[in-house]
Protein backbone atom coordinates (compact mmCIF):
# COMPACT_ATOMS: atom_id res chain seq x y z
CA UNK A 1 0.00 0.00 0.00
CA UNK A 2 1.14 3.51 -0.90
CA UNK A 3 2.06 5.59 2.21
CA UNK A 4 -0.37 8.31 3.30
CA UNK A 5 0.55 11.80 2.06
CA UNK A 6 0.53 14.46 4.80
CA UNK A 7 -2.27 17.03 4.32
CA UNK A 8 0.06 20.06 4.13
CA UNK A 9 2.25 18.42 1.50
CA UNK A 10 -0.74 17.76 -0.74
CA UNK A 11 -1.88 21.37 -0.36
CA UNK A 12 1.62 22.73 -1.11
CA UNK A 13 2.07 20.52 -4.17
CA UNK A 14 -1.18 21.88 -5.60
CA UNK A 15 -0.19 25.49 -4.88
CA UNK A 16 3.24 25.09 -6.39
CA UNK A 17 1.97 23.61 -9.64
CA UNK A 18 -0.84 26.08 -10.32
CA UNK A 19 0.12 29.47 -11.75
CA UNK A 20 -2.46 32.24 -11.27
CA UNK A 21 -4.20 33.59 -14.37
CA UNK A 22 -2.94 36.91 -15.75
CA UNK A 23 -5.96 37.48 -18.00
CA UNK A 24 -7.95 40.58 -17.08
CA UNK A 25 -10.99 42.44 -18.37
CA UNK A 26 -12.49 45.83 -17.66
CA UNK A 27 -15.93 45.88 -16.00
CA UNK A 28 -18.19 48.51 -14.45
CA UNK A 29 -17.87 49.04 -10.69
CA UNK A 30 -21.14 47.18 -9.96
CA UNK A 31 -20.12 44.24 -12.15
CA UNK A 32 -16.86 44.01 -10.19
CA UNK A 33 -18.67 42.77 -7.08
CA UNK A 34 -17.21 39.42 -5.99
CA UNK A 35 -14.52 39.56 -8.68
CA UNK A 36 -10.75 39.58 -8.17
CA UNK A 37 -8.93 42.85 -8.72
CA UNK A 38 -6.60 42.72 -11.73
CA UNK A 39 -4.74 46.01 -11.24
CA UNK A 40 -3.29 48.19 -8.51
CA UNK A 41 -5.68 51.00 -7.57
CA UNK A 42 -3.90 54.31 -7.10
CA UNK A 43 -5.87 57.13 -5.56
CA UNK A 44 -6.05 60.05 -8.06
CA UNK A 45 -7.44 62.38 -5.38
CA UNK A 46 -7.50 62.96 -1.65
CA UNK A 47 -10.42 61.26 0.14
CA UNK A 48 -11.88 63.22 1.79
CA UNK A 49 -11.09 65.84 -0.83
CA UNK A 50 -11.00 68.74 1.70
CA UNK A 51 -10.88 69.27 5.45
CA UNK A 52 -14.44 68.86 6.69
CA UNK A 53 -16.48 68.81 9.84
CA UNK A 54 -17.12 65.59 11.79
CA UNK A 55 -20.02 67.23 13.67
CA UNK A 56 -22.86 69.71 13.40
CA UNK A 57 -21.66 72.79 15.25
CA UNK A 58 -19.49 75.92 14.86
CA UNK A 59 -16.19 76.29 13.02
CA UNK A 60 -13.77 78.55 14.90
CA UNK A 61 -10.06 79.32 15.27
CA UNK A 62 -8.58 77.06 17.96
CA UNK A 63 -6.52 79.98 19.28
CA UNK A 64 -9.79 81.72 20.29
CA UNK A 65 -10.59 79.01 22.85
CA UNK A 66 -10.49 80.43 26.40
CA UNK A 67 -8.27 78.96 29.15
CA UNK A 68 -10.85 80.03 31.75
CA UNK A 69 -14.43 81.16 31.65
CA UNK A 70 -16.51 81.64 28.50
CA UNK A 71 -15.91 83.12 25.10
CA UNK A 72 -18.48 84.66 22.80
CA UNK A 73 -17.91 84.79 19.04
CA UNK A 74 -19.82 86.41 16.23
CA UNK A 75 -21.54 84.00 13.76
CA UNK A 76 -20.69 85.39 10.30
CA UNK A 77 -21.95 82.70 7.93
CA UNK A 78 -22.63 79.04 7.34
CA UNK A 79 -21.06 76.04 5.61
CA UNK A 80 -23.32 73.15 4.58
CA UNK A 81 -22.36 69.86 2.91
CA UNK A 82 -22.25 70.78 -0.77
CA UNK A 83 -22.56 74.52 -0.10
CA UNK A 84 -19.32 75.78 1.46
CA UNK A 85 -18.79 79.20 3.07
CA UNK A 86 -17.19 81.50 0.55
CA UNK A 87 -14.69 83.91 1.95
CA UNK A 88 -12.41 83.83 4.90
CA UNK A 89 -13.18 83.74 8.61
CA UNK A 90 -11.27 85.94 11.08
CA UNK A 91 -10.27 85.54 14.72
CA UNK A 92 -13.23 86.29 16.97
CA UNK A 93 -15.64 84.93 14.37
CA UNK A 94 -17.34 81.59 13.83
CA UNK A 95 -19.26 79.81 11.08
CA UNK A 96 -22.29 77.61 11.57
CA UNK A 97 -21.21 74.25 10.07
CA UNK A 98 -22.81 70.86 9.41
CA UNK A 99 -21.28 67.36 9.26
CA UNK A 100 -19.28 66.82 6.07
CA UNK A 101 -19.24 70.52 5.18
CA UNK A 102 -15.96 72.16 4.15
CA UNK A 103 -13.98 73.84 6.94
CA UNK A 104 -13.85 77.53 5.95
CA UNK A 105 -10.51 79.24 5.35
CA UNK A 106 -9.27 80.65 8.63
CA UNK A 107 -10.98 77.95 10.78
CA UNK A 108 -9.29 74.83 12.19
CA UNK A 109 -11.63 73.60 14.93
CA UNK A 110 -15.30 72.59 15.22
CA UNK A 111 -17.24 72.90 18.48
CA UNK A 112 -20.21 70.52 18.51
CA UNK A 113 -23.57 72.27 18.73
CA UNK A 114 -24.49 70.52 22.00
CA UNK A 115 -21.63 72.48 23.65
CA UNK A 116 -22.60 75.83 22.14
CA UNK A 117 -25.02 78.46 23.40
CA UNK A 118 -26.49 80.46 20.54
CA UNK A 119 -28.13 83.84 21.01
CA UNK A 120 -28.97 85.76 17.86
CA UNK A 121 -25.77 86.26 15.87
CA UNK A 122 -23.58 85.33 18.85
CA UNK A 123 -22.42 81.94 20.06
CA UNK A 124 -20.56 81.16 23.30
CA UNK A 125 -18.49 78.25 24.57
CA UNK A 126 -17.25 77.36 28.05
CA UNK A 127 -13.67 76.36 28.98
CA UNK A 128 -15.25 73.80 31.35
CA UNK A 129 -15.98 71.59 28.31
CA UNK A 130 -12.22 71.14 27.75
CA UNK A 131 -12.27 71.92 24.04
CA UNK A 132 -9.08 71.32 22.12
CA UNK A 133 -7.81 73.22 19.10
CA UNK A 134 -8.27 71.06 15.97
CA UNK A 135 -11.09 68.92 17.36
CA UNK A 136 -13.88 67.48 15.18
CA UNK A 137 -12.06 68.14 11.92
CA UNK A 138 -11.58 65.35 9.37
CA UNK A 139 -8.43 66.06 7.39
CA UNK A 140 -8.19 65.87 3.59
CA UNK A 141 -6.60 62.56 2.49
CA UNK A 142 -7.15 60.95 5.90
CA UNK A 143 -8.87 57.93 4.29
CA UNK A 144 -6.92 57.77 0.99
CA UNK A 145 -4.11 60.11 -0.07
CA UNK A 146 -3.59 61.28 -3.63
CA UNK A 147 -1.01 59.00 -5.29
CA UNK A 148 -1.33 56.29 -2.65
CA UNK A 149 -1.76 52.62 -3.70
CA UNK A 150 -4.95 51.70 -1.87
CA UNK A 151 -5.88 48.25 -3.30
CA UNK A 152 -3.61 45.52 -4.61
CA UNK A 153 -4.23 43.03 -7.45
CA UNK A 154 -5.64 39.79 -6.05
CA UNK A 155 -8.00 41.50 -3.64
CA UNK A 156 -11.50 40.09 -3.73
CA UNK A 157 -13.89 42.95 -4.29
CA UNK A 158 -16.69 43.24 -1.75
CA UNK A 159 -18.92 46.07 -0.55
CA UNK A 160 -16.16 48.16 1.06
CA UNK A 161 -13.88 47.89 -2.00
CA UNK A 162 -16.69 48.83 -4.41
CA UNK A 163 -17.34 51.89 -2.25
CA UNK A 164 -13.63 52.78 -2.15
CA UNK A 165 -13.29 52.51 -5.94
CA UNK A 166 -16.43 54.61 -6.42
CA UNK A 167 -15.19 57.22 -3.91
CA UNK A 168 -12.10 57.66 -6.09
CA UNK A 169 -14.35 58.44 -9.04
CA UNK A 170 -13.54 55.37 -11.15
CA UNK A 171 -16.43 54.17 -13.35
CA UNK A 172 -14.79 50.88 -14.32
CA UNK A 173 -12.08 48.61 -12.98
CA UNK A 174 -9.82 45.84 -14.28
CA UNK A 175 -10.60 42.40 -12.85
CA UNK A 176 -9.21 38.92 -13.46
CA UNK A 177 -11.12 36.91 -16.06
CA UNK A 178 -13.43 34.26 -14.62
CA UNK A 179 -12.09 30.71 -14.48
CA UNK A 180 -14.26 28.09 -16.26
CA UNK A 181 -14.98 24.96 -14.27
CA UNK A 182 -16.63 21.82 -15.67
CA UNK A 183 -17.89 19.15 -13.28
CA UNK A 184 -19.63 15.80 -13.37
CA UNK A 185 -20.48 12.87 -11.13
CA UNK A 186 -19.50 9.31 -11.90
CA UNK A 187 -21.27 6.14 -10.83
CA UNK A 188 -23.68 3.49 -12.11
CA UNK A 189 -25.68 3.81 -8.87
CA UNK A 190 -26.46 7.50 -9.36
CA UNK A 191 -29.86 8.90 -10.20
CA UNK A 192 -30.58 12.57 -10.95
CA UNK A 193 -32.79 14.50 -8.54
CA UNK A 194 -36.35 14.65 -9.86
CA UNK A 195 -36.23 11.16 -11.43
CA UNK A 196 -37.64 7.90 -10.00
CA UNK A 197 -35.13 5.99 -7.89
CA UNK A 198 -34.45 2.42 -9.03
CA UNK A 199 -33.47 -0.49 -6.79
CA UNK A 200 -29.86 -0.16 -5.64
CA UNK A 201 -29.68 3.47 -6.78
CA UNK A 202 -28.96 6.65 -4.81
CA UNK A 203 -29.58 10.25 -5.73
CA UNK A 204 -26.57 12.23 -6.91
CA UNK A 205 -25.96 14.86 -4.22
CA UNK A 206 -22.33 15.72 -4.94
CA UNK A 207 -23.15 17.58 -8.13
CA UNK A 208 -25.33 19.93 -6.07
CA UNK A 209 -22.84 20.51 -3.25
CA UNK A 210 -20.03 21.01 -5.81
CA UNK A 211 -22.26 23.39 -7.80
CA UNK A 212 -23.01 25.41 -4.64
CA UNK A 213 -19.42 25.57 -3.41
CA UNK A 214 -18.23 26.60 -6.88
CA UNK A 215 -20.97 29.26 -7.15
CA UNK A 216 -19.48 31.03 -4.14
CA UNK A 217 -16.12 31.30 -5.90
CA UNK A 218 -17.32 33.45 -8.79
CA UNK A 219 -16.35 31.01 -11.55
CA UNK A 220 -18.17 30.07 -14.75
CA UNK A 221 -19.87 26.69 -14.33
CA UNK A 222 -20.38 23.86 -16.81
CA UNK A 223 -22.50 21.03 -15.37
CA UNK A 224 -21.90 17.85 -17.40
CA UNK A 225 -24.33 15.69 -15.42
CA UNK A 226 -23.87 12.07 -14.40
CA UNK A 227 -21.47 9.86 -16.34
CA UNK A 228 -21.86 6.10 -16.05
CA UNK A 229 -18.96 3.83 -15.15
CA UNK A 230 -18.15 2.89 -18.78
CA UNK A 231 -14.68 3.39 -20.13
CA UNK A 232 -15.73 5.12 -23.38
CA UNK A 233 -18.25 7.38 -21.66
CA UNK A 234 -15.80 8.49 -19.00
CA UNK A 235 -13.06 9.07 -21.56
CA UNK A 236 -15.39 11.16 -23.73
CA UNK A 237 -16.59 13.16 -20.72
CA UNK A 238 -13.03 14.02 -19.71
CA UNK A 239 -12.13 15.08 -23.25
CA UNK A 240 -15.24 17.28 -23.52
CA UNK A 241 -14.69 18.80 -20.11
CA UNK A 242 -11.01 19.57 -20.67
CA UNK A 243 -11.75 21.14 -24.06
CA UNK A 244 -14.23 23.61 -22.52
CA UNK A 245 -12.84 24.42 -19.11
CA UNK A 246 -9.76 25.54 -17.16
CA UNK A 247 -10.61 23.14 -14.34
CA UNK A 248 -12.39 19.78 -14.33
CA UNK A 249 -13.90 18.36 -11.14
CA UNK A 250 -15.42 14.93 -10.74
CA UNK A 251 -16.66 12.98 -7.77
CA UNK A 252 -16.55 9.23 -7.25
CA UNK A 253 -14.33 6.62 -8.74
CA UNK A 254 -11.04 7.67 -7.16
CA UNK A 255 -11.02 5.05 -4.40
CA UNK A 256 -9.90 1.49 -5.01
CA UNK A 257 -13.12 -0.02 -6.37
CA UNK A 258 -13.94 -2.68 -8.92
CA UNK A 259 -15.97 -0.53 -11.27
CA UNK A 260 -13.86 2.62 -11.06
CA UNK A 261 -12.55 3.41 -14.53
CA UNK A 262 -11.60 6.94 -13.72
CA UNK A 263 -8.05 6.03 -12.78
CA UNK A 264 -7.42 3.91 -15.87
CA UNK A 265 -8.85 6.52 -18.18
CA UNK A 266 -6.80 9.29 -16.65
CA UNK A 267 -3.62 7.26 -16.87
CA UNK A 268 -4.16 7.32 -20.64
CA UNK A 269 -5.39 10.90 -20.97
CA UNK A 270 -3.30 13.01 -18.67
CA UNK A 271 -0.87 13.30 -15.83
CA UNK A 272 -2.76 12.69 -12.65
CA UNK A 273 -1.63 11.74 -9.17
CA UNK A 274 -3.88 9.50 -7.16
CA UNK A 275 -3.19 10.47 -3.60
CA UNK A 276 -4.09 8.81 -0.37
CA UNK A 277 -4.02 11.75 2.00
CA UNK A 278 -3.59 11.43 5.77
CA UNK A 279 -6.92 13.12 6.43
CA UNK A 280 -10.44 12.17 7.47
CA UNK A 281 -12.89 12.37 5.89
CA UNK A 282 -11.61 12.33 2.33
CA UNK A 283 -8.56 10.11 2.04
CA UNK A 284 -8.53 9.62 -1.74
CA UNK A 285 -7.96 12.65 -3.96
CA UNK A 286 -6.81 12.79 -7.57
CA UNK A 287 -4.98 15.88 -8.77
CA UNK A 288 -3.21 16.67 -12.01
CA UNK A 289 -3.82 17.66 -15.61
CA UNK A 290 -6.12 16.38 -18.31
CA UNK A 291 -4.91 17.96 -21.54
CA UNK A 292 -4.56 21.65 -20.59
CA UNK A 293 -7.11 21.62 -17.77
CA UNK A 294 -6.41 21.16 -14.08
CA UNK A 295 -8.19 18.14 -12.69
CA UNK A 296 -9.51 17.31 -9.22
CA UNK A 297 -11.10 13.93 -8.58
CA UNK A 298 -13.07 14.13 -5.33
CA UNK A 299 -14.03 11.07 -3.31
CA UNK A 300 -17.61 9.86 -3.78
CA UNK A 301 -18.79 9.98 -0.19
CA UNK A 302 -20.76 13.22 0.20
CA UNK A 303 -18.98 14.59 3.29
CA UNK A 304 -15.57 13.57 1.92
CA UNK A 305 -16.38 15.33 -1.35
CA UNK A 306 -17.29 18.55 0.48
CA UNK A 307 -14.34 18.49 2.87
CA UNK A 308 -11.76 17.80 0.15
CA UNK A 309 -13.34 20.49 -2.01
CA UNK A 310 -13.21 23.07 0.80
CA UNK A 311 -9.69 22.17 1.90
CA UNK A 312 -8.02 21.67 -1.51
CA UNK A 313 -10.16 22.72 -4.47
CA UNK A 314 -11.44 26.04 -3.12
CA UNK A 315 -7.96 27.40 -2.26
CA UNK A 316 -6.62 26.04 -5.56
CA UNK A 317 -9.33 27.72 -7.64
CA UNK A 318 -8.88 30.95 -5.69
CA UNK A 319 -5.15 30.74 -6.41
CA UNK A 320 -5.74 30.05 -10.11
CA UNK A 321 -8.21 32.96 -10.20
CA UNK A 322 -5.44 35.25 -8.98
CA UNK A 323 -6.87 35.83 -5.50
CA UNK A 324 -4.40 36.55 -2.74
CA UNK A 325 -3.88 33.45 -0.57
CA UNK A 326 -5.67 33.44 2.77
CA UNK A 327 -4.82 30.99 5.51
CA UNK A 328 -8.04 29.68 7.06
CA UNK A 329 -8.83 31.28 10.37
CA UNK A 330 -8.58 28.78 13.24
CA UNK A 331 -9.70 29.63 16.74
CA UNK A 332 -8.79 27.70 19.90
CA UNK A 333 -11.94 26.72 21.81
CA UNK A 334 -12.88 24.36 24.59
CA UNK A 335 -14.76 21.29 23.35
CA UNK A 336 -17.63 20.43 25.69
CA UNK A 337 -17.99 16.78 24.77
CA UNK A 338 -15.86 13.73 24.12
CA UNK A 339 -14.71 13.15 20.53
CA UNK A 340 -13.44 9.82 19.30
CA UNK A 341 -10.32 9.77 17.15
CA UNK A 342 -7.54 7.38 16.27
CA UNK A 343 -4.00 8.71 15.74
CA UNK A 344 -2.69 8.79 12.15
CA UNK A 345 -4.81 11.20 10.10
CA UNK A 346 -5.69 14.90 10.33
CA UNK A 347 -9.42 15.02 11.04
CA UNK A 348 -12.03 17.60 10.11
CA UNK A 349 -14.83 16.71 12.49
CA UNK A 350 -18.01 18.70 12.17
CA UNK A 351 -18.79 20.96 15.12
CA UNK A 352 -21.32 23.45 16.44
CA UNK A 353 -20.19 26.63 18.21
CA UNK A 354 -22.17 27.97 21.14
CA UNK A 355 -21.83 30.17 24.20
CA UNK A 356 -21.65 28.53 27.61
CA UNK A 357 -23.21 30.00 30.76
CA UNK A 358 -20.06 32.07 31.43
CA UNK A 359 -20.31 33.66 27.98
CA UNK A 360 -17.28 31.76 26.65
CA UNK A 361 -17.51 30.48 23.05
CA UNK A 362 -17.19 26.70 23.10
CA UNK A 363 -17.68 23.92 20.54
CA UNK A 364 -19.35 20.54 20.52
CA UNK A 365 -19.26 17.70 18.02
CA UNK A 366 -22.12 17.66 15.50
CA UNK A 367 -22.98 14.00 16.18
CA UNK A 368 -22.42 11.10 13.76
CA UNK A 369 -19.15 11.75 11.92
CA UNK A 370 -19.55 9.18 9.10
CA UNK A 371 -18.40 10.38 5.69
CA UNK A 372 -21.86 9.57 4.28
CA UNK A 373 -23.76 11.67 6.88
CA UNK A 374 -24.27 14.84 4.85
CA UNK A 375 -26.60 16.21 7.49
CA UNK A 376 -23.57 16.65 9.76
CA UNK A 377 -22.39 19.39 7.37
CA UNK A 378 -25.79 21.07 7.53
CA UNK A 379 -26.15 21.18 11.31
CA UNK A 380 -22.48 22.13 11.81
CA UNK A 381 -21.08 25.64 11.53
CA UNK A 382 -17.39 24.74 11.82
CA UNK A 383 -14.74 22.09 11.48
CA UNK A 384 -13.03 20.86 14.63
CA UNK A 385 -9.51 20.31 13.27
CA UNK A 386 -7.75 17.50 15.12
CA UNK A 387 -4.05 16.98 14.29
CA UNK A 388 -2.90 13.58 13.00
CA UNK A 389 -1.29 12.55 16.30
CA UNK A 390 -4.37 13.38 18.41
CA UNK A 391 -5.91 10.27 19.98
CA UNK A 392 -9.26 11.64 21.10
CA UNK A 393 -10.72 14.62 22.92
CA UNK A 394 -12.09 14.66 26.46
CA UNK A 395 -14.84 17.08 27.49
CA UNK A 396 -13.15 20.37 28.42
CA UNK A 397 -10.08 19.91 26.18
CA UNK A 398 -8.93 22.77 23.93
CA UNK A 399 -9.32 22.18 20.17
CA UNK A 400 -8.77 24.23 17.01
CA UNK A 401 -11.95 25.38 15.28
CA UNK A 402 -12.26 26.49 11.66
CA UNK A 403 -15.60 28.32 11.18
CA UNK A 404 -17.35 27.68 7.87
CA UNK A 405 -17.05 30.65 5.56
CA UNK A 406 -20.38 31.87 4.32
P1 LIG B 1 -16.83 5.83 -5.07
O1 LIG B 1 -15.77 6.83 -4.71
O2 LIG B 1 -17.30 5.99 -6.46
O3 LIG B 1 -16.39 4.43 -4.76
O4 LIG B 1 -18.05 6.16 -4.12
C1 LIG B 1 -17.94 6.13 -2.69
C2 LIG B 1 -19.31 6.27 -2.07
O5 LIG B 1 -19.88 7.54 -2.39
C3 LIG B 1 -20.35 5.25 -2.56
O6 LIG B 1 -21.18 4.93 -1.45
C4 LIG B 1 -21.11 6.02 -3.61
O7 LIG B 1 -22.40 5.51 -3.82
C5 LIG B 1 -21.15 7.41 -3.03
N1 LIG B 1 -21.26 8.40 -4.10
C6 LIG B 1 -20.49 8.47 -5.20
N2 LIG B 1 -20.86 9.50 -5.98
C7 LIG B 1 -21.88 10.12 -5.34
C8 LIG B 1 -22.70 11.24 -5.65
N3 LIG B 1 -22.51 11.95 -6.76
N4 LIG B 1 -23.66 11.60 -4.76
C9 LIG B 1 -23.84 10.89 -3.64
N5 LIG B 1 -23.11 9.83 -3.29
C10 LIG B 1 -22.14 9.41 -4.14
MG1 LIG C 1 -18.30 5.16 -7.97
Image (spheres, rainbow, N blue to C red):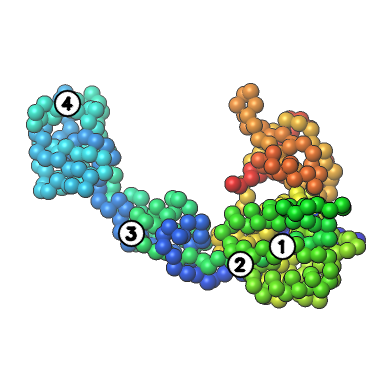
Crowd rating for badge 4 (residues with CA inside 10 Å; few <14, some 14–19, many 20+)? few
Q: Position of residue 189 (x, y in %)?
A: 83, 57
Q: Nearer the viewer, mark 1 or mark 4?
A: 1
Residue at x 25%, y 48% (from the top left corner): 51
Is residue 71 depicted above or below 214 in this figure? above
x and y percentages locating residue 1 in the rendered image: 91, 61
Q: Where does label 2 land, which residue?
A: 180
- Residue 117's tag is 4
For marks 3 and 2 on the same chain, the one whose residue lies earlier in the sequence: 3
Q: Residue at x 73, y 37 (%)?
A: 366
| Residue contact at pointers 3 and 1, CB within 8 angstroms | no
Label 1: which secondary element:
strand
How far is disc 4 from disc 2 in space, using C-alphas?
Answer: 65 Å
Which residue is identified by label 1?
225
Q: Is residue 134 above or below residue 22?
A: above
**Nearer the camera: disc 2 or disc 1:** 1
Residue nearer the viewer, 274 or 198: 198
Dot placed on the residue nearer the N-terminal end, 1 or 4: 4
Write down the residue under mark 3.
169
Q: Nearer the viewer, mark 4 or mark 2?
A: 2
Q: Earlier in the sequence, mark 4 or mark 2?
A: 4
- Asked whether residue 386 appears in the rendered view, the answer is no
What is the secondary structure assignment of the residue under circle 4? strand
Rendered residue at 78%/52% (across/down): 196
Amino acid sequence: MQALLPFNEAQEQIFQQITPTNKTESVSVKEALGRTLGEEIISPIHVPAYNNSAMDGYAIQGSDLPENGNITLEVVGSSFAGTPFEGSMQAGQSIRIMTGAKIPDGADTVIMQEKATREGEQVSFSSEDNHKAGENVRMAGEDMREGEAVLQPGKQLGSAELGMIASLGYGSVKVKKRIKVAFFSTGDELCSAGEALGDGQIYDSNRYTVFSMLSELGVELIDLGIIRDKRELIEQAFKDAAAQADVVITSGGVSVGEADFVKETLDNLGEVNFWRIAMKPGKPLAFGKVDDAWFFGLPGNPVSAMVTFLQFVRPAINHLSGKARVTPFRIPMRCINKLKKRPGRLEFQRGIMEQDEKGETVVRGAGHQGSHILRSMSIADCFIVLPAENSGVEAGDWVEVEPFQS
